[in-house]
């Protein structure tokens, strides 16, 4: 490989490694946009070979220090997470180094800062993307480093024969991968509680389900496919899509375009009973992922019982208490990244409720409500007195005459009236609010419920995505209880996606699921059970395979082998591209050299064929003649302007092979006659 | 050429490589610098070369008081015709052996410059062409350096090859002392004519140079110019010289095209005297050093494939 090619390849690999490291933190979405822009810019500049900071080395380093100071000042002010700030600073350092003078030392500095980014990424993001980034980073950085290693013994101008180097590098990188995997599988899991991040107080807005339902505001609602919860159901309904309502919060009061709850909190306890229940319940094992960003429990509608809540940080998992807020929500009392709990729901039937409950808040209509709302409601409902029929009429009307959109209306004075009489389109919260308030104007008791609609099967679980967040209405039916009515047109319920996209997200889910169970949750217990299967083979193996240790060694080694082969192949492809040849006769030379190698004729690595032949002739080696003939033919073809015919080439090689087999089988063979 | 080499080998015993290179030099229209201790056959080689080709030969012994006119010739006043007449000096021969070249003062040495470069002699505004083919074979003694004027770089640059013969091996030497009587080169009969030599030179000129080989040569030259231990790399004239020598070398194999190996074969004799090293050691040691550096360099420069 030519030195220039070597440097270029090394720099490219280095940049890709840095990009992978940055992606690991960038994809978490918590890195400031300015940093993202800066990195992308310097990545592109570095890829095209513009090292713009080279002349301003000192001043740019000082600027970098100031930027770092600014970042940490923001941490001090509370505007930025410490880990994010550290990652951002590492990013800046790596940008600076990438755009500076290109030496082996600069490369190492870029790698170091990339490594810091990777470490930060481990704290910020723990989903499958981090795994992918980690793999890319590890592969490219190892190759880049390996190329740096040969800089030492080899001079800058020296031409390094590529194939032996690539072979050695590929082998050692594969070895490193296998070693890392073995390390991962066998090294005891440590519980360093350094990187735990606090889950934010209250409820986040990322899911679309928030602690208040606001009708105003600008912008769009994002339908993200990000998974926020996983649920295993018992008994398992076995269907691919579980179009069910998962209720999280209930709201009773509408004021100034917002729905609020006014429940009374009960003291934390390890179990919460919402209603008496008997048989015919669905048991749900729910995991709320960090992306849920909330502590409100969700369960299939109607939920009756919660128990066994656990709050997990990145490293530990503890029992957590639950707080019931009367007629509003149940939430976890402790902090954590993710939560698991069991919930029980009755099989769809409304809970029997005594009519003695106070329904006044559910009939309250704000004083400043637009009079047209009541008029419209009266016009649609007519003199219907049955709440179910009234709600059904309103639902039909809303679904027929109003369109669904994810675009928010912007700040309007009365978002409800704006939705009903001017815009005539809105999202689920508009529909739910309209239905609820219109029923209330006519004296019916109703409330708004927020949660999720959907449930898509992945492996043996159902997942809820951020885009599945939904809001609907519950109408009080005397003698029966709260009954669900959804005024939102069907196209707007949950995050429905095109089939291709759903296939992609499903595949992603599978991989993510695998990553979570086999890698993220791989723990000391799994290690012990795995070792136990090896130590006590006969009985234990059967038991363990039935119980399923989460990382079967055969599979892990298989993955390592595949990864190794892939990286090796990748490097081969890259190096082949970097060292492409032009002359057609060169491949003939390759064939000749292969035979020289087989006959062990070269005295040193990379000795030119012509020199070898000349040496053979002087020492009257038995193979001198056939090789001389073939070499002369190659030289003619390469330098003499007499191209090789394809059959001539194979004929030459055949003769040579014949001579080779004759030469090696005869007793006076090669090395004895050499000088 | 093989015939010539064998023929010449009769008098220059045990030095096949140097003999062949000397012929290569002649075919490549170059001048030869022989650098070695006295008595190893420098003169024999030079005279043998001249005789083989049936070329006219003159030997000039360079001394400290040798003047340019002594070698170039002089305007002599012819009394009968009462005008000046040019009387050619010993340089007007086809092969000139400039023995102990470094003993002559610089102005005499540089009197050779034009002759070697342009194959002509200019005196008193008259230019006299030299007989063709023309070659200077210079010798110098690297050990006995007292009272010598080291050859300037420009002069060295004009020698195509620098060869050193070295001592004979024991068996060759013993064979030599048994057989040798009297005049050494006398029995050597010409086996080729000057016209043959010119034809060979033409053939060498016709040797095809592939762009890849040209790039290879340039890469080596660039290598000498960028090398840490070399003060000054080779000149473009040196690159041209290398190519013409390599073309002549290609004829040995009966090829009409140039290969990288040809370049490598002639590289050391052609360039080792043209490099100026950073380490200030002079003389033969510096040649060894340069040869070593070139050898190292050649291994590093990728061979065109």
Image: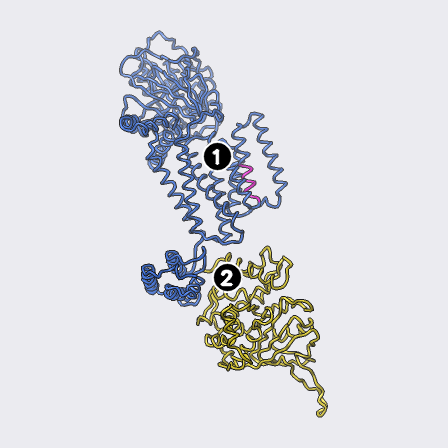
Question: Quick one: label 2, few (<14), some, or many (20+) residues within 10 Å?
Answer: many
State the residue lying farthest toward the bottom: B80
Q: Is residue A168 visible?
A: yes
Query: In the structure shown, which secondary structural element does the residue marked by tag 1 occupy?
Result: helix
Q: Quadrant of the C terminus of chain B?
A: bottom left
In reply to whether residue A272 is colored magenta, the answer given is no
Q: Which residue is mark 2?
A: B216
Magenta span: A91-100
Q: Main secondary structure of the magenta part?
A: helix
Front-lying residue, A637 or A671: A671
Horizontal arrangement in the rendering, residue A258 relative to residue A517 (left or right)? right
Which of the colour schemes (rainbow, by chain, secondary structure, one colour) is used?
by chain
Identify by letter the chain in blue: A
Q: Is residue A417 visible?
A: no
Q: Chain of mark 2?
A: B
For the residues labelled 2 and 1, the Cα–Cα distance comes to 45 Å
């Amino acid at each position: 490989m030519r030195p220039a090619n070597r440097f270029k390849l090394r720099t490219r690999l280095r940049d890709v490694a840095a990009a992978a490291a940055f992606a690991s933190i960038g994809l978490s979405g918590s890195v400031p946009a300015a940093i993202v822009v800066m990195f992308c810019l310097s990545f592109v500049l570095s890829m095209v070979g513009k090292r713009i900071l080279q002349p301003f080395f000192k001043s740019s380093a000082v600027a970098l220090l100031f930027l770092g100071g600014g970042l940490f000042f923001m941490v001090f002010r509370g505007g930025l997470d410490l880990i994010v700030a550290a990652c951002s600073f590492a990013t800046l350092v790596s940008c600076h180094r990438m755009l500076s003078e290109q030496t082996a030392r600069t490369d190492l500095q870029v790698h170091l800062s990339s490594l810091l980014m990777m470490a930060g990424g481990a704290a910020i993001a723990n989903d499958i993307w981090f795994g992918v980034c980690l793999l890319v980073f590890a592969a490219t950085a190892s190759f880049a480093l390996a190329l740096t290693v040969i800089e030492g013994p080899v001079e800058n101008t020296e031409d390094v024969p590529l194939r032996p180097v690539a072979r050695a590098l590929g082998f050692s990188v594969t070895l490193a991968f296998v070693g890392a995997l073995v390390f991962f599988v066998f090294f005891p899991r440590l519980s360093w509680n350094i990187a735990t991040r606090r889950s934010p107080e209250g409820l986040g807005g990322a899911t679309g389900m928030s602690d208040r339902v606001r009708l105003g505001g600008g912008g769009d609602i994002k339908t993200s496919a990000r998974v926020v919860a996983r649920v295993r159901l018992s008994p398992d309904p076995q269907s691919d899509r579980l179009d069910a309502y998962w209720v999280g919060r209930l709201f009773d009061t509408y004021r100034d375009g917002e729905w609020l709850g006014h429940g009374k909190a009960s003291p934390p306890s390890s179990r919460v009973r919402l209603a008496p229940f008997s048989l015919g319940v669905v048991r749900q094992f729910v995991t709320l992922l960090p992306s849920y960003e909330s502590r409100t429990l969700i369960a299939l509608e109607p939920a009756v019982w919660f128990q066994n809540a656990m709050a997990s940080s990145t490293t530990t998992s503890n029992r957590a208490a639950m707080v019931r807020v009367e007629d509003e929500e149940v939430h976890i009392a402790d902090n954590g990244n993710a939560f698991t709990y069991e919930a029980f729901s009755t099989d769809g039937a409304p809970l029997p409720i005594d009519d003695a409950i106070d329904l006044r808040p559910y009939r309250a209509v704000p004083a400043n409500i637009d009079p047209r709302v009541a008029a419209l409601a009266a016009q649609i409902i007519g003199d219907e007195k049955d709440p179910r029929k009234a709600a059904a009429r309103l639902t039909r009307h809303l679904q027929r005459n109003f369109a669904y959109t994810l675009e928010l209306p912007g700040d309007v004075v009365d978002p409800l009236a704006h939705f009903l009489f001017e815009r005539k389109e809105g999202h689920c919260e508009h529909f739910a609010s309209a239905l609820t308030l219109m029923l209330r104007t006519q004296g019916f008791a109703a409330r708004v419920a927020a949660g999720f609609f959907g449930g898509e099967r992945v492996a043996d679980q159902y997942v809820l995505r951020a885009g599945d967040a939904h809001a609907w209405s519950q109408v009080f039916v005397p003698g029966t209880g709260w009954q669900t009515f959804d005024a939102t047109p069907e196209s707007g319920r949950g995050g429905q996606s095109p089939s291709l996209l759903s296939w992609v997200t499903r595949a992603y889910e599978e991989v993510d699921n695998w990553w979570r169970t086999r890698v993220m949750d791989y723990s000391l217990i799994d290690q012990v059970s795995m070792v136990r299967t090896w130590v006590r083979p006969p009985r234990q193996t059967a038991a363990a395979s039935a119980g399923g240790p989460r990382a079967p060694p055969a599979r892990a080694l298989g993955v390592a082998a595949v990864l190794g082969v892939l990286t090796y192949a990748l490097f081969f492809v890259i190096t082949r591209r970097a060292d492409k040849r032009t002359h057609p006769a060169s491949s003939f030379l390759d064939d000749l050299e292969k035979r020289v190698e087989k006959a062990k004729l070269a005295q040193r690595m990379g000795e030119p064929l012509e020199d070898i032949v000349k040496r053979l002739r002087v020492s009257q080696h038995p193979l001198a003649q056939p090789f001389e003939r073939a070499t002369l033919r190659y030289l003619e073809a390469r330098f003499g302007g007499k191209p090789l015919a394809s059959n001539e080439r194979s004929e030459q090689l055949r003769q040579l092979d014949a001579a080779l087999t004759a030469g090696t089988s005869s007793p006076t063979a090669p090395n004895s006659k050499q000088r | 050429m093989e015939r010539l080499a064998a023929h010449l080998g009769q008098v220059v015993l045990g030095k096949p490589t140097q003999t062949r290179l000397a012929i290569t030099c002649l075919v490549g229209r170059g001048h030869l610098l022989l650098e070695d201790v006295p008595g190893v056959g420098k003169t024999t080689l030079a005279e043998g070369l001249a005789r083989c080709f049936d070329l006219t030969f003159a030997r000039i012994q360079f001394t400290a008081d040798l003047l340019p006119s002594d070698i170039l010739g002089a305007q002599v006043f012819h009394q009968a015709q009462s005008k000046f007449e040019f009387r050619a000096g010993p340089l007007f021969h086809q092969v000139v052996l400039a023995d102990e070249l470094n003993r002559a003062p610089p102005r005499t040495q540089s009197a050779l410059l034009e002759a070697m470069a342009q194959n002509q002699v200019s005196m008193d505004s008259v230019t006299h062409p030299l007989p063709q083919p023309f070659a200077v074979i210079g010798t110098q003694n690297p050990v006995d350096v007292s009272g010598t004027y080291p050859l300037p770089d420009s002069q060295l640059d004009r020698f195509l090859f620098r060869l050193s013969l070295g001592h004979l091996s024991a068996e060759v030497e013993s064979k030599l002392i048994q057989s040798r009587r009297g005049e050494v080169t006398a029995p050597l009969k010409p086996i080729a004519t000057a016209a043959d030599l010119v034809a060979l030179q033409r053939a060498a000129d016709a040797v095809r140079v592939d762009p890849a080989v040209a790039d290879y040569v340039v890469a080596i030259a660039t290598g000498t110019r960028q090398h840490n231990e070399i003060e000054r790399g080779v000149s473009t004239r040196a690159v041209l010289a290398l190519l013409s020598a390599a073309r002549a070398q290609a004829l040995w194999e009966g090829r009409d095209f140039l290969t990288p190996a040809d370049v490598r074969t002639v590289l050391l004799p052609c360039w080792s005297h043209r490099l100026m090293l950073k380490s200030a050691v002079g003389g033969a040691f510096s040649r060894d050093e340069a040869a070593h550096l070139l050898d190292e360099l050649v291994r590093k420069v990728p061979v065109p494939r």
